[in-house]
Image: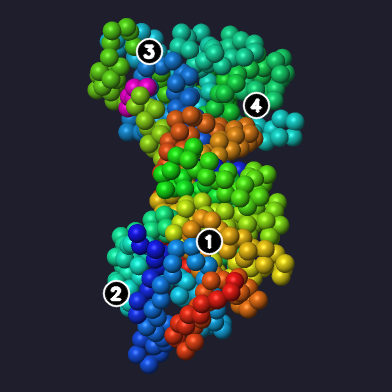
Amino acid sequence: MINLAYKDISHSLSKFLITAISVGVLLGIVIIMIGVYRGMVFDAEVLVRDIKADIWVVQQDTLGPFAQTSKVHEDLKYQISYQDGIEESGAITFQTFQMINKGKDFKVMLIGYDPFGNIEVIDNKKLIEGRVIEKSHYEIVVSQKIGYSLGEFITLGRDQYKVVGITKDTVSNSGDYLIYSSLKDAQILQFTYTNERIRSDEKRGIKGSNPHLVNAIIAQTKEGFNATTVARMIEHTTHKKVFTKDEQESLLVDKVIKKSSKQIGMFTVILILVSIVIIALIIYTMTLEKIKEISILKLIGIPNLTIAIMIIEETVVLGFLAFISGNIFARLIAGGFPKRVLLELSDAFSLFIIILISSVFASLFGIYKVIKTDPAQAIGG
Amino acid sequence: MNNIAIKIENLSKSFGQGDSKVTVIDGASFSLKKGEFVSLVAPSGAGKTTLLMMLGCVLEPSSGKITIGDEVVYDNKWKVKDDRELRRKKIGFIFQAHYLIPFLNIEENIKLLPYENGESEKVVGKRVDSIMDYLDMKDKMKSMPSQLSGGQNQRIAIARALANEPDIILADEPTAALDKQRAISVVKMLKKITREQNVTIVMVTHDDSLLPYCDKVLSIEDKKINIKVNAKV
């Protein structure tokens, strides 16, 4: 038997490949958009995952410390540590600000934690150079993306901090690069005001600031204790809001990035629809280009089914090649994006199935044209 | 055994309705025997292609009867379920231009129809070899249509029309694109085919110089079909 689709594609291979690659670039953008969404969700959760805490205690009636501002007293950690089922507790602060290094602007999140506590805040797997913070003051761990080297000094506020460790892939829920300092240093940076501010506050009757505030208390549960049960119990006894790790992750995804992810999701759906329409138009145009041959085939007696199979096969091959080139394109450019683009095989496979089914549907326009083509068109006169 | 290849009785074809109704063929009747080489002549717009399309079951007549071999294909309505299957198995076509499928090589162009008829590769291969031998084109089997001259492609078009062993071949001005010498060569070849393959060929032509090569000349005059039998060919 003669495979008409194979023969047609082979005959105009370069044209077919260029068409497939062009559609592939479009699909590549869809894959990137999905990757941006995945990256956003991943980044939202990565900070909470990196910090090895089972429980987050925050200000009452807030969704802190990420979805809402939260301030609690540092000494709350002692009260938490005495609760049933708690193994370890510690205080933590989060503060975002702008940094400039070698002329480049970086938005960073400073995490202040107790370097002498037992809760791991910096994920050891992500510490690629140096060490974690071991002193109460003037040491800092930075993300490699900011461009500092070990031993360099960074000026923050009134003080200088020595870079003692470098991490990779550490970002906040907003995708900002992370830097880590001791809790004391972070509290000074966040809660200690300048002299001008203190004088201005005094004139308003406000006396001093409280540098012993933190944004949350984190805790680890003892083995055998259920984190949710312990969280509800602490919530009941301390009049604070308490989240488990899973609840905090859900909060970040549902509250913090919900709108952004919806926006990207909608944009992705529109892009997929546009891709399907473009594939349909390409298949239709390819069919129109062959209309003379199709009318000849019909006139000499070739059934519609044989011609329709040719169009469907060409559509599937086009969809497959476009998918392959789209994936290559996406992987080539994904690294150039400023925020994380997470390309997952399962997403690519799902998109392939969607594009494949849609392409076959799209080819129905071409097949309709075949059915409607009058074989008499082949005869002149 | 019936020696009639095609028989039409009281065949008419009109286009449009009411005041705009135009009758092209009006009550035509004739029959052609197997192995006859027949030309169809008429001025432009007189209905040659319309008649050819009706004979090829491509265009539905307004009334009348068409019989191909022993099978009544039209009797005031189509009598065949699948007109394309009928064409695939009983009719061959040759056009003004060769109209070979450009993305198939010569061999594939010729074998496409018999394969579609479900014939085995062995049987088809043997037959196509013999046809290409007959047309002296065997060395062109793997060429693409774009690599051959107009005359060579027209011979391949003839080979394609013969490949499904049809009862009749309908040729719509097959020599129109060829020079005089090549046109005569093609017509001689068609005549030879009618004799040796026992196939009936109806050829539309504008070229009067080709008429002496035909057994019969069908002409359309005033919507009627006249038949002239050539005594000497």
Q: Secondary structure at mark 1?
A: helix
Q: CA distance from mark 4 to mark 1?
A: 84 Å
In this view, B159 is above or below B129 = below
Image depth: mark 4 or mark 1 in front? 1
Q: Amino acid at mark 4?
A: Lys
**Circle 2 is placed at which residue position?**
B76
Q: Amino acid at mark 1?
A: Thr
In the image, taking residue A155 as reference, residue A114 lies left or right, namely left
**Circle 3 is placed at which residue position?**
A220
Q: CA distance from mark 1 to mark 3?
A: 97 Å
Q: Secondary structure at mark 3?
A: strand
Disc number for residue B194: 1
Is the residue marked by circle 1 packed among few (<14), some (14-19), or many (20+) residues within 10 Å?
many
Q: Position of residue B39 (x, y in %)?
A: 54, 73
In the image, taking residue B103 as reference, residue A314 lies left or right, namely left
Near-viewer residue (A309 or B63): B63
Q: Amino acid at mark 2?
A: Asn
Asked if labels 2 and 1 share a chain, the reply is yes
Asked if labels 4 and 2 share a chain, the reply is no
Tell me if label 2 and label 1 are in contact, CB under 8 Å.
no
